[in-house]
Structures are given as structure tokens and as C-alpha cells.
Amino acid sequence: MKRTGRRVYLSGICREDTAEKIHVEGGTNVGAIQNILVDERRGYAYKMTFAAVYPNVTNSNRIFNSGYGVYSYSRRELLRMTDAQVAAALGYTRDLAVDNRNVAIVGVPLDRANFSENSMINYQNQYVIKGDAMVTQSLSIGWQLGDSSAQATYYIELDEYEVNDNEEILLILNERAQTAAGLAD
């Protein structure tokens, strides 16, 4: 495995109306997953080095973004998921910490309960990125839906690596290792 020196910077918005999968509980949409990156070139992998909520500081009506999870699911995999699989992937029926497909978690950038128009908003996000996680083909964002969090804005930095065939196979197996029996427990 050799770092190419190329960095990839991703930023954008994931919205309920553009998500590939929606998780529904009791007739209410409660979570969503949307694909944000597809790179099916052989011989390349990515290591995530930074992830944050991308704040909108110019419009105070749009600052309520959701925290989110970053996953190695492809769009094709998302479209084939059952609702039970989506619930498990989003952490409704299983802990995210044991899922190799979950690469990172990014927290909400402010405490909504303590928010007021005159408060100083803390845009330094809390995040966790799995140190050994490498992404071989796809990245997706999963987030909770609600009145003030129907969207997730993101900023992600990735380092690109060249990998040989054996390394690529091992990385793909590692991504899927803990979900080989299926997504739902």
C-alpha cells in the first residue's frame, strides 16, 4: 500500500428527498442513507483523515444540520437493502461500533437545547474516524431525520492510496467482515 499524495475533498448536502434509503418507524421517516462517492477504479483505496458538519453561517435558519455516520455502502447496496437492514446500518437495532461498514461518526455542531440567537455557536465538531478503516469503492452518509434535521451537510477529507490486488481483496474483506451474515442481526 502506497500513498499517492492525492487528497480528495468532499462537501455537500444529503437531504431526505435525495436519499437512496429511508428508515421508517411507525409510519414516520426517522433515518436516511445517501451515497456521496463512487470510485470503482481498481488498485485504489481511501483513508478518511477528517470529517465535519459543514456549517451555514450566513443563514441562521439553515444551521440545524444533523450529525451523521459515514459508511462504505455503494448506491447499489443501498437500493437493495430491506428496512431491517437500513435500521441495523443506522444503529437502530445494532451498535455502530461493531459494524465495519461504519467508517466514521460526526456529531452535531451545537447543543440545540442551549441555542439562542445571541449564543456563540461551536462549529468545531466532535468526530470519530476508525483508524484502520480504508474505503475501496464507495462512501455513503447516514443521518437521523426530524423536524430540524432533514438534512446533513458534510465536509470530508480522504487520502488516496495505491493498492495491489491482494491488498484490495483484503481491504474489501475487512470492510465486510462483520456483516458477512447480513446486515440485520
Image (cartoon, rainbow, N blue to C red):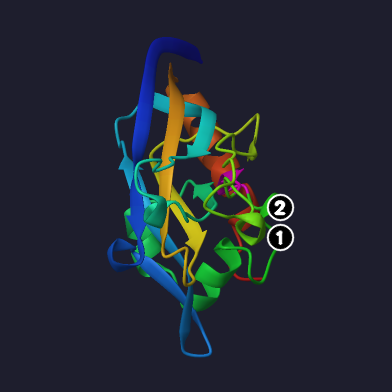
Magenta highlight on residue 151? no
Residue 182 can be seen in this image: no
> In terms of depth relative to the viewer, which is nearer, 150 or 182?
150
Q: Nearer the viewer, residue 120 or 20?
A: 120
Residue visible at 39% across and 43% down? 56
Judging by the rendered image, the residue that carries numbered circle 1 is 95
> In this rendering, is residue 152 above or below 166?
below
Secondary structure state at the residue bearing disc 2: helix
Instruction: Tell whether 101 sits left or right of 152.
Output: right
- Look at the picture and state if 19 lies above or below 126: below
> Which residue is pictured at 31% across the width and 36% down the height?
39
Q: Nearer the viewer, residue 123 or 1?
A: 123
* Number of numbered discs on residues: 2
Q: Mark 2: which amino acid?
A: Val
Q: Which mark is residue 98?
A: 2
Residue 101 drawn at (x, y percent): 56, 49
Proximity of marks 2 and 1: CB atoms separated by less than 8 Å = yes
Distance from Cα at disc 2 to Cα at disc 1: 6 Å
User: What percent of the width, then of the height, locates residue 175?
Assistant: 56, 43
Of badges 2 and 1, the one in the foreground is 1
- Residue that lies at the very extreme toward the front in this rendered image: 118
Q: Which residues are magenta?
A: 100-107
Q: Is residue 169 left or right of residue 124?
A: left
Q: Is residue 59 visible?
A: yes
Q: Position of residue 144 (x, y in %)?
A: 52, 64
In magenta segment, residue 105: yes
Which residue does the image show at 33% across and 29% down from the upper left?
Answer: 42
Q: Residues within 10 Å of mark 2 (few under 14, many from 20)?
A: few
Looking at the picture, tell me which residue is in the foreground, 7 or 73. Answer: 7
Disc ID at residue 16: none
Is the magenta region chiefly helix, strand or loop?
A: strand
